[in-house]
Image (cartoon, helix red, strand yellow):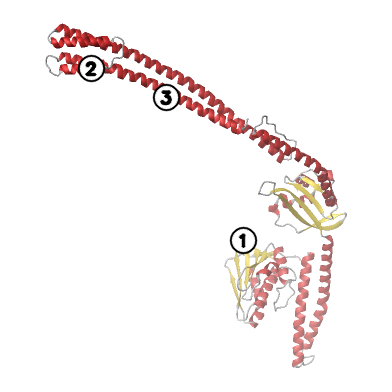
Amino acid sequence: MKIKTKLNAGVGLLFLMIIILSALGGWFIFQLKKDTQNILVANYNTLQYSRNMLLAVEDLQTSPRASELFRKNLKLQKDNITEDGEREATERVSEQFKLLLENPENVNIQSTIRKEIAEIMQLNMAAIRTKSGVANLTAQNAIAFISIAGTVCFLIAFIVMLNLPSNIADPIRKLTMSIRQIANQNYQERVQFEGNSEFGELARSFNTMAEKLQEYSESRLDKILKGKKRIETLIDNMHDAVIGIDENRKVLFVNDEALRITGLKRENFVGKLIQDVAVTNDLVRKIITEIIAPQDLKNKQDVLKIFVAGKENYFEQEIVDINVVPTGEKESNLIGQVIMLRNITPFKELDLAKTRFLGTVSHEFKTPISSVKMGLQLLENKKVGQLNIEQSRLVAGIREDIDRLLKITGELLNITQLESGLVQLQIHPAKIETIVDSAVTANLTKAQAKNIEIKISIDEGLPEILADEDKTVWVLNNLINNAVKFSRENSEVSVSVFKNERDEAVFRIEDNGSGIGKKYREKIFERYFRVPDTLAEGTGLGLSISKELIESQNGKIWLEDSEDGAVFCFTIPLMT
């Protein structure tokens, strides 16, 4: 049966039962009304007429209108004959009334009239009792029939209420569960609905779809397996170590390079939770630190140094989150991660060779430059000989070039020492005022040459800092030197020191120069970077060295946003 037919049948049956109950109740009400109306019209009126005639008989001798009242009610009574024997009694009353009119004082006639009227009243009273019994019987029948019909209707409605929704909802629920099975790639799922209803047609269409999906899935399985094998082969032949884990951190795959550097066997790696593997392998534990405990990445190394086959190897680690948007959904879900270790050993070796080369060249340059500088000092000595004006200018120019070369070689030596880890920091308590005074004093001459005022502001009550005093002075000196170099003449450079909420001393250097463009601010601390179109000369290493020195002292250096001029800040931990 069709769903529409079922709904129409159920609703129509309920509607029919309502009509039957309404019609049955209306019919019985009509019967009760008819019975009570008969009592009122036929018998009650006769009693009323009889009463009026009795009163008229009593007043016949005293009231001239009594005979007229009697005739009137007698006429009404003759028109209201409803019971057996009532007509004969009424005729006798009429005859006796005529005799009474002829002999008004005859007591016997009056008595006879009263008896006949009483007989009429008795007949109607008996009729009222009979009709009342009929009305009661009608009421009882009404209650019985309506109760039986109401009970039957209730049972039918209850059965319809239980069966009709389930007949519609159960197939929908079964179909929903089957659709979920298909969504989970269980293409063997089938639904069976009997009959020729819409659900039967839907079940046949659904089963046809499932069969086609199953056929398609089986036909594509070999291609999927080949594709999977191809991907596994590509991963195994990669020169970089690759480890794949799912959303539960279970190892899905690992290539040969990862097995080689970890020293593990594939059966002891694949299929295991990576944190369980990390318990017995220090390298794996170091690799997954970013996944397991991302809050501990403050001192994370950018490069991993791993000994493989007795040789130092350097790797860059990258963790890629794999997110997919399931079909039919909008939000992406994390289904796993891929850990990649890029072997940068050749680049690291080249970088170390470059560092050693720069260190050697800088060191070798320093000795002849110092000799040239000593020769210049001898030339400037008047005991050796007097120089003319042109010779003095040439010597001054040579001195400036030598000072520039010494500065460049010094910066190159510093950067090579930082890269090679040969710089030994002497961390100890140091006074902030001493560091600021040393750096400012070193730049006073240059500042006075451009008529630049260096303003110093240090908060009162600041404790000493934990730092390498010489290296901190070098950084502050470099920043003040840059501020003076790039500031306009007749301006000022502000040097202030204050405490932040992390119990650190913040050194803030602000100038009034042309500032640094927004597109260059992210690169300002890179090695050898110089802002284009700047007139001042330099190697581009000063800020890079400053960053290395500050961060090695557990501090931080940055460039603040400023519309006018440049504002550099760095922090050093305070004594607690």
Residue 75 - label: 2
Mark 2 and mark 1: span between their CA atoms?
125 Å
- The residue carrying mark 3 is 26
Point 77% across, 77% down: residue? 406
First in sequence: mark 2 vs mark 3: 3
What amino acid is found at the position of numbered circle 1 in the picture? Asp
Q: In this figure, what is the number of numbered marks?
A: 3
Q: Earlier in the sequence, mark 2 or mark 1?
A: 2
State the residue lying farthest toward the right.
309
Q: Please name the amino acid that badge 2 sits on.
A: Lys
Q: Where on the picture, by quarter, is residue 519? A: bottom right
Q: Is residue 356 visible?
A: yes
The residue to which callout 1 is attached is 503
- Quarter placement of the N terminus: top right
Q: Residues within 10 Å of mark 1 (few under 14, many from 20)?
A: some
The local secondary structure at tag 1 comes to: loop
Which of pointers 3 and 1 indicates the residue nearer the eye? 3
Relative to 304, residue 387 above or below: below
**Residue beneath the point at 71% across and 70% down:** 543
Q: Earlier in the sequence, mark 3 or mark 1?
A: 3
The residue lying furthest to the top in this view is 108
> What number is the disc on residue 60?
none
Tell me where residue 109 appears, x and y as whole percent: 17, 7
Three-letter code for the amino acid on which mark 3 is drawn: Gly
